[in-house]
Image (tube, rainbow, N blue to C red):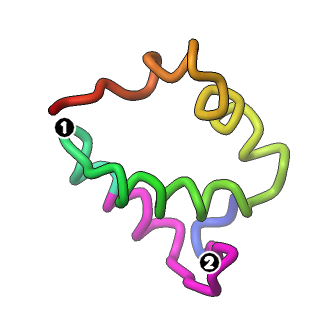
Amino acid sequence: MPYASILRNSTGDSIKLIDLVKYVESKQNRIAVSEMDKIISFIANIEFKHARPLMELIEDQTKQAELFKIIQ
C-alpha cells in the first residue's frame, strides 16, 4: 500500500496508514478490546489482497492466539 494511504472504516472515520501503524506499534504490549475493534474496522475495509491474510486469522478463533493473548 502507498505510504500516504488513508484508511476509512464503515462509520466514516479515517486515519493515515502510517498513523495506524505507529499506534499499533505503541500499543503492542497491551491494547483494549474496543481499540482493537477500531483497528480491525480499518483493516477490514482495505483492499482484499492486503486484508485477507490478517482477517483470516482474526475471524478464525482457533488461529487468533497467533495474534492475541487476552489479559484480564
Assess whether residue 9 is covered by the magenta stretch.
Answer: yes
Judge the density around disc 2: few (<14), some (14-19), many (≥20) Cα neighbours within 10 Å: some
Q: Residue furthest top?
A: 62
Q: Amino acid at mark 1?
A: Asn
Question: Where does the image place residue 2, in percent across and percent down from the top left?
Answer: 67, 65
Q: Is residue 9 left or right of residue 49?
A: left
Residue 13's image quarter?
bottom right
**How far separated are the C-alphas under marks 2 and 1?**
25 Å
Q: What residue is disc 2 on? A: 6
- Along the viewing direction, whichever of 62 and 4 lies nearer the viewer: 62
Question: Where does the image place residue 45, in percent across and percent down from the top left?
Answer: 73, 63
Residue found at x 66% / y 32%? 59
Reply above or below: 71 against 43.
Answer: above
Reply above or below: 61 against 71.
Answer: above
Q: Where is the N terminus found, in terms of image quarters?
A: bottom right
Residue 44's image quarter?
bottom right
Assess whether residue 16 is covered by the magenta stretch.
Answer: yes
Q: What residue is disc 1 on? A: 29
Residue found at x 57% / y 21%? 61
**Where does the magenta region start and end?**
7-23
Q: Is residue 53 left or right of residue 25?
A: right
- Along the viewing direction, whichever of 12 and 61 lies nearer the viewer: 61
